[in-house]
Amino acid sequence: MKILKIITTLVLVFFISKVTAQETVPTLSGKVTISIKEGTFDCDVTLSNIPPLKDYFLRLNSGMNILYFHSLKPNDFLIGYDKSLKDTTATGEANAYFFPDNTRKGKFLPKEIRMKYTGKFPVATDTIQNYSKSDWKGNIAFNGYSVRADGRQTAWYPVLYDVEKDKTYSEIKYDIEVACSDCTTLYINGNLPVKATQSRFKSEVPIEISMYCGNFDFKNRGGTYILNPNLTDEQFSEFCNLTNSFQKYYEKNLRIPFGGAVTFVNTTPTSAKNAWLFVTYPTIFSIGHGENGLKSLFNPKIQNWYRPFIAHEIGHYYFGTYKVFNSELGDMMSEGFTEYLSLQLTRDILGEDVYQKKINGKLKELQGFDPTSFSKVNSKNDYKDRELYVYNYAPLIFTAIEKEIGKPKMWQWLAILLKEKTDFTNYDFLIKSLEATLQNKSQLENIKSKYFDSDVSVTNIQSALK
């Protein structure tokens, strides 16, 4: 067994600017044992410093088989548990557990819980015969040479959800030992990658515990890491310069410092054709085969399509990490405003022609789409088609509003959205933040009637963006 190495925790102060000293942040400790050949997780972990929630769920990936939940505080005993089908905000990958109290009518939540569970997942070793139909962010993905898992959606570790406040505790502190005898490199979000089969990882900064472990190398330049790189040294240098310019662009316009160095993971899906990116700051995952990975940045045929995607994921530091959005419009705001940021960067850095092509493509996608206006959305189900709603409809509305109020006011609105404190980022929050920006009631009512309340908002968008 290799001697355990304590990995220096990255300084991520900006990443938790939204966390105050008064908040109770859960802590995960224990041991996680993985096999990338067998596709297995064995976890013996303890969740402590649990906030006193009255109405909650404890989410855990549905592929995990539970041996026990054990209350350590305030009392020491094995806990009986139930599952709920009412956790409508869960994405489907996780089961929602809770602990009934003695009356069986309420819920009991210990201050500290030890839990043992194990899971076995499919291993996709090739794309000819042994592969899955699809891959996605919330998949615990074993691709033959590595394992990839985010934290919030896969819920490979226990994730508390506060029903009353619509708050998910996926960003937590941790002190865990990770062992993988058939790995050469281990990486846990918030730490540096390490060449080892076993290591201890710690973070005193609340962070989403995504992971990428397996057989791969990594590169570092100025604190920016790429795990499993397939870039030449020249490309790697250009890549770092490009992504740094994206970060500086957002900093300058929003007047909010960017959080710090980003780690990029370059990996392949468990399927034959899927390719996408997602972020769990400070890590950005790029999933795709061959030219659909980070190499896409240097392919003249597709780089103008791919670079805005990188800009989008970097923009999620602000809309998704610096500020977390919830309520019925939270998903729209998180993705819609981030895509709007990406569009602005595309126009100002990548070029007007690239920007206009993106706008025209989104307008084309909206043909025949009959969206529910912002003011009438009561749940995510009202989006009808989430992809169209959050990635096309919403950013085009914001682009149309930009035409009405000008770029300086738009950047001011975005900054207010990010800095304004609120429990719920709902429709009222959206309106109040715009009202504070405009200081013009007639202009606000005009925007509301054309874009937020209208049944013909798509037509109004098309007219504004001709």
Image (cartoon, grey):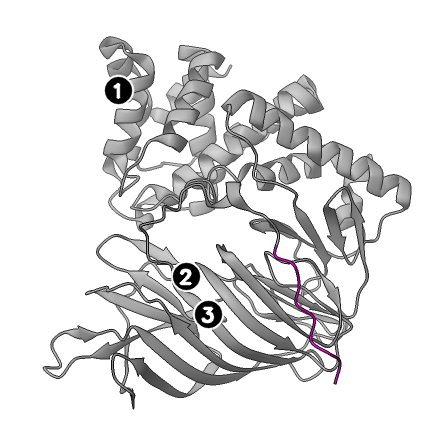
At x 30%, y 39%, the residue is 425
- State whether residue 78 is above or below residue 258: below
Q: Which residue is mark 2?
A: 91
| Corner quadrant of residue 272 | bottom right
Mark 3 crowd level (few <14, some 14–19, many ≥20, 10 Å Cα): many
Q: What element does badge 3 sit on?
A: strand
Residue placed most toward the observer, 36 or 301: 36
Residue 5 in picture, x, y percent from top left = 70, 71
Nearest to the eye among marks 3 and 2: give it: 3
Q: Inspect the magenta stretch and tell me whether residue 5 lies in it.
A: yes
CA–CA distance in space, label 2 to label 1: 33 Å
User: Which residues are the magenta region?
Assistant: 1-9
Mark 2 crowd level (few <14, some 14–19, many ≥20, 10 Å Cα): few
Q: Which residue is mark 3?
A: 28
Residue 409 in picture, x, y percent from top left = 42, 14
Amino acid type, callout 2: Thr
Q: Mark 1 or mark 2, which is nearer the start of the sequence? A: 2
Q: Which residue is mark 1?
A: 449
Q: Inspect the magenta stretch and tell me whether residue 320 lies in it.
A: no
Q: Is residue 329 visible?
A: yes
Q: Mark 1 or mark 3, which is nearer the start of the sequence? A: 3
Amino acid type, callout 1: Ser
At x 52%, y 63%, the residue is 138
Residue 354 in picture, x, y percent from top left = 68, 24
- State whether residue 344 is above or below residue 44: above
- Magenta part mainly helix, strand or loop? loop
| Corner quadrant of residue 352 | top right
Q: Would you say 96 lies left or right of 146 here?
A: left
- State whether residue 28 is above or below residue 275: below
